[in-house]
Image (cartoon, rainbow, N blue to C red):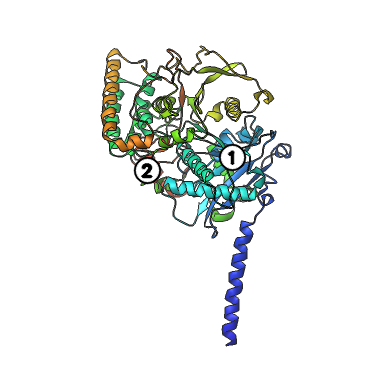
């Protein structure tokens, strides 16, 4: 009898201790996440940055945890701002944003130093590794398979984050990111708006003020059909390539007719054809920045060149300890193939279907770098021109205006009915990587900050600036200008006409697609506005899928999951270089 009582007491004690551990974990405070000493950063520079980092549990059992990295504003304003930055993939770490783009630090000459274009100048910025399995985030459960599940996890993160940092709960909230985040962000924005419309008892209202998407993957129909005109405009097209791409695009449209998914494996072959055609023995064009070359068949996966430094740094035990990221025994990879593989059966609606309703309630900014192939600016301009929101289609008669940063043309700016489109000159798939001050000025303007407070000059002009940057002529989307032979031009015109007719027939037969897209009913290549000659377009973006295998979707930047190394090396050594794999970071 006594033995059984002791056994019962032992079990009860263990249960209480387990419960206490969970409660204590849930009751963490902000100071538990404070980063006090980031290795390799000088004391002087460390003093300039206040930041918090660590794992945020999404469930009571702590089996799913998202890694976040919060950088506080250097110069907070009266209406304080909070930006949540997301990279894409799916499965690519937002450490890309932290160390390469919008974060406070950069690797310069192999050393960490302050990024003068960091978005934390006037706003708190959170860099979030999501979904679980991405970067330093981890889970003991299967990886998520749908955008609904991923959105549920994001909303759980918001609730947990504001419980730890309640002073930021009423900051103006912005979601920002690039590439496949063009899918994440509209879904998360919709989740926030639905939460706000019927805020559960005991929970807070999220002060969402806008969504900012760079080179985003949003609308497969119009973005897949942008590769032919983009290749022609930027001198990547040949007659033979036009023939093969036209055949591939026909197959792509057939797949979209059957089911309009976020990505279509067969459609990804359009990028691979361009990369293959523009290769020279051991080199090829960089799919994220067509001004650059890379080893074939990587074609951009080895870029940016700081990625090996990031990998080495983020896997150091002292760095992980400083970031409170030792749980989960996680090895940092830029992108996780397993996260992408888990989504291969996802039949979620492309995020273009969500934009019109979101634009009724908050603002959206789409920005495109000039030199990106994989999520190029022509595709973004097509989707805008064919989208109906707030009762009108496209930008109508709204004119684009010139934009300068430090007295140099930075790009073009156009906005109407809650939507802003920014074309950014001389920049790649990762706009802030190439032009950090331009990107900082852009987000500050979008957030309504007084740009006179910036340490550099900028201006938006009332008239269109006709100066043409080094990237080439301005694009008339309605009638792309040929750089190939007359026969090639005629062939391209014929292909465009056939595609237009085909999609018209497709959409008329598919009323469900029309309903989901809110008036997004077929490819019609209009300029962004109805002003003749005022629809300039130059830009680029990253996407995430290989040609035939979604498993390879997120092998990005030459940094892979360790379990994928053997398969990847086999691919490189196989001699089968017919189809280098495009990726969306």
Q: Which residue is mark 2?
A: 550
Image coordinates of residue 136 in percent, x first then y, are 54, 48
Q: Nearer the viewer, residue 400 or 72?
A: 400
* Screen quadrant of the N terminus: bottom right
In front of the other: 520 or 538:
520
Q: Are marks 1 and 2 in contact (CB under 8 Å)?
A: no
Q: Residues within 10 Å of mark 2 (few under 14, many from 20)?
A: many
The local crowd at label 1, few if under 14, some if 14 to 19, many if 20 or more residues have their Cα within 10 Å, is some
**Residue 123 in the image: above or below residue 525:** below
Q: CA distance from mark 1 to mark 2?
A: 36 Å
In the drawing, does residue 309 fall left or right of residue 352?
right
Q: Earlier in the sequence, mark 1 or mark 2?
A: 1
* Percent x, y of residue 279: 38, 27
Residue 261 falls in image quadrant: top left
The reply to whether residue 286 is in sight is no
Secondary structure beneath label 2? helix
Q: Nearer the viewer, residue 97 or 278?
A: 97
Q: Quadrant of residue 167?
A: top right
Which of discs 1 and 2 lies nearer the camera? The answer is 1
Is 315 placed left or right of 29 in the picture?
left
- Secondary structure under tag 1 reads loop
For the point 37% across and 43% down, which residue is it?
A: 550
What is the tally of numbered marks visible in this picture?
2
Q: Which residue is mark 1?
A: 207
| Residue 507, percent from left and from top | 29, 32
Q: Is residue 183 visible?
A: yes
Q: Establish if 400 lies above or below 311.
A: above
């Amino acid at each position: 009898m006594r033995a059984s009582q002791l056994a019962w007491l032992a079990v009860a004690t263990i249960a209480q201790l387990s419960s206490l551990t969970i409660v204590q974990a849930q009751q963490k405070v902000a100071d538990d996440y404070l980063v006090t000493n980031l290795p390799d950063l000088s004391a002087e520079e460390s003093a300039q940055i206040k930041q918090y980092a660590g794992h945020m549990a999404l469930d009571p059992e702590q089996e799913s945890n998202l890694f976040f990295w919060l950088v506080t504003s250097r110069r907070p304003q009266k209406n304080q701002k909070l930006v949540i930055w997301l990279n894409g993939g799916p499965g690519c770490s937002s450490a890309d944003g932290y160390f390469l783009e919008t974060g406070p630090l950069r690797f310069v000459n192999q050393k960490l130093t302050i990024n003068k274009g960091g978005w934390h100048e006037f706003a708190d910025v959170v860099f979030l590794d999501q979904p679980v399995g991405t970067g330093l985030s981890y889970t003991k459960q299967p990886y998520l398979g749908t955008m609904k599940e991923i959105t549920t996890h994001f909303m759980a993160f918001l609730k947990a984050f504001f419980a730890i940092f309640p002073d930021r709960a009423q900051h103006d909230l912005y979601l920002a990111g690039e590439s496949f985040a063009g899918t994440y962000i509209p879904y998360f924005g919709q989740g926030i708006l639905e939460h706000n419309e019927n805020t559960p008892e005991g929970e807070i209202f999220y002060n969402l003020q806008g969504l900012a998407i760079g080179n985003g993957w949003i609308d497969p129909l119009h973005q897949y059909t942008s590769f032919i005109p983009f290749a022609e405009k930027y001198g990547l097209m040949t007659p033979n390539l036009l023939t093969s791409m036209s055949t591939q695009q026909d197959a792509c449209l057939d797949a979209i007719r059957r089911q309009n998914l976020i990505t279509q494996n067969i459609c990804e072959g359009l990028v691979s054809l361009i990369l293959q055609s523009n290769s020279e023995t051991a080199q090829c064009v960089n799919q994220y920045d067509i001004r650059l070359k890379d080893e074939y068949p990587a074609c951009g996966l080895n870029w940016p060149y700081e990625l090996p430094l990031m990998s080495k740094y983020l896997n150091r035990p002292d760095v992980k300890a400083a970031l409170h990221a030792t749980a989960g025994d996680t090895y940092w990879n830029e992108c996780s193939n397993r996260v992408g593989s888990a989504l291969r059966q996802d039949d979620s609606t492309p995020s273009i279907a969500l934009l019109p309703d979101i634009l009724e309630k908050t603002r959206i900014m789409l920005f495109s770098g000039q030199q990106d192939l994989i999520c190029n600016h022509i595709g973004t301009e097509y989707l805008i021109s064919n989208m109906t929101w707030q009762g009108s289609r496209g930008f109508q008669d709204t004119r684009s205006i010139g934009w300068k940063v430090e007295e140099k043309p930075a790009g073009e700016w156009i906005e109407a009915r809650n939507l802003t489109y920014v074309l950014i000159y001389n920049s790649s798939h990762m706009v802030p990587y190439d032009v950090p001050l331009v990107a900082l000025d852009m987000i500050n303007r979008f957030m309504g900050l007084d740009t006179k407070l910036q340490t550099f000059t900028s201006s938006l002009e009332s008239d269109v600036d006709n100066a043409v940057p080094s990237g080439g002529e301005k694009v008339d989307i309605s009638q792309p200008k040929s750089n190939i032979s007359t026969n090639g031009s005629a062939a391209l015109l014929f292909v465009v006409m056939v595609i237009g007719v085909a999609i018209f027939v497709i959409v008329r037969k598919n009323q469900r697609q029309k309903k989901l897209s809110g008036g997004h009913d077929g490819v019609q290549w209009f300029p962004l506005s109805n002003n003749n000659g005022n629809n300039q377009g130059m830009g680029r973006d990253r996407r995430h899928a290989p040609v035939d295998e979604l498993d390879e979707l997120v092998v990005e930047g030459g940094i892979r999951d360790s379990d994928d190394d053997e398969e990847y090396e086999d691919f490189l050594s196989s001699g089968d270089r017919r189809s280098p794999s495009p990726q969306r970071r």
